[in-house]
Amino acid sequence: AQSVTQPDIHITVSEGASLELRCNYSYGATPYLFWYVQSPGQGLQLLLKYFSGDTLVQGIKGFEAEFKRSQSSFNLRKPSVHWSDAAEYFCAYSGSARQLTFGSGTQLTVLP
Amino acid sequence: EAGVTQFPSHSVIEKGQTVTLRCDPISGHDNLYWYRRVMGKEIKFLLHFVKESKQDESGMPNNRFLAERTGGTYSTLKVQPAELEDSGVYFCASSQDPRGRSPLHFGNGTRLTVT
């Protein structure tokens, strides 16, 4: 079955440290891949997307993600985390069914 | 441009009552989606409108849920009668492109609590 896996339910990092959030997908073809972020009381905001082409995509707020077909992964990275990055992060894909399939989310805590 | 707006932001109802959630998409977006996140679980697709037509309602959990989009503008999602397991956050999203390439713009969600 098609699915998205975010293996880390909760990650804690110190402010200024680097960050990598993992995402693996199970889908026969190359899907459209997305990372969304949800801050408390807010809706889901798109950080970045991958459709095709360059496998390293840049997003907003200094985030980037790399698509690795061989590993079926689309991990999100940021070189230096800010306290305002504390939020919940969702990986998602859109396949032939067109609607988004989400991972279970990773809650990020940033320590001062 | 105004974003996707949802009303109410919170709703607390008793089991057996009826609740109607409303979503106003971004103007000009023909595609409107409803999603739901039950506590601790993934965000799940409920259904997809293209204008006023239901394109895909495969995610609707049962016939207690009724979604409408009269006139192809705003949409409502009615739960009647509500059950405890319906508690969660209901998100609405809209987009321009139905092919999955256009990012979805999400509202802030409606937190529904059924007691």
Image (tube, rainbow, N blue to C red):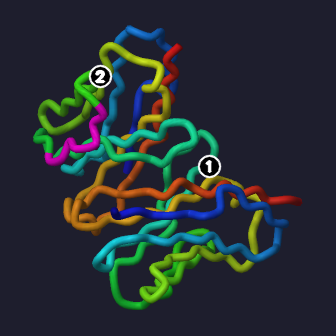
Give the percent coordinates (x, y) of residue A77.
Answer: 63, 76
* Residue B15: image location, x then y, percent: 44, 11
Mark 1, secondary structure of its residue: loop
Q: In the image, is residue B53 above or below residue B98?
A: above
> Mark 1: few, some, or many residues within 10 Å (few <14, many ≥20)?
some
Q: How far separated are the C-alphas under marks 2 and 1?
A: 27 Å
Q: Between residues B31 and B40, which one lies in front from this camera angle?
A: B40
Q: Is residue B59 magenta?
A: yes
- CB within 8 Å, label 2 to label 1: no
Mark number, residue B78: 2
Q: Is residue B101 left or right of residue A108?
A: left
Q: Which residues are magenta?
A: B55-61
* Point 41% across, 27% down: residue: B7
> What residue did someone put label 1 on?
A39
A106 to A71, vertically: above or below: above
Q: Secondary structure at mark 2?
A: strand
Q: Are marks 2 and 1 on the same chain?
A: no
Location of residue B46 with respect to A52 vertically, above or below: above
- Camera-nearest label, 2 or 1: 2
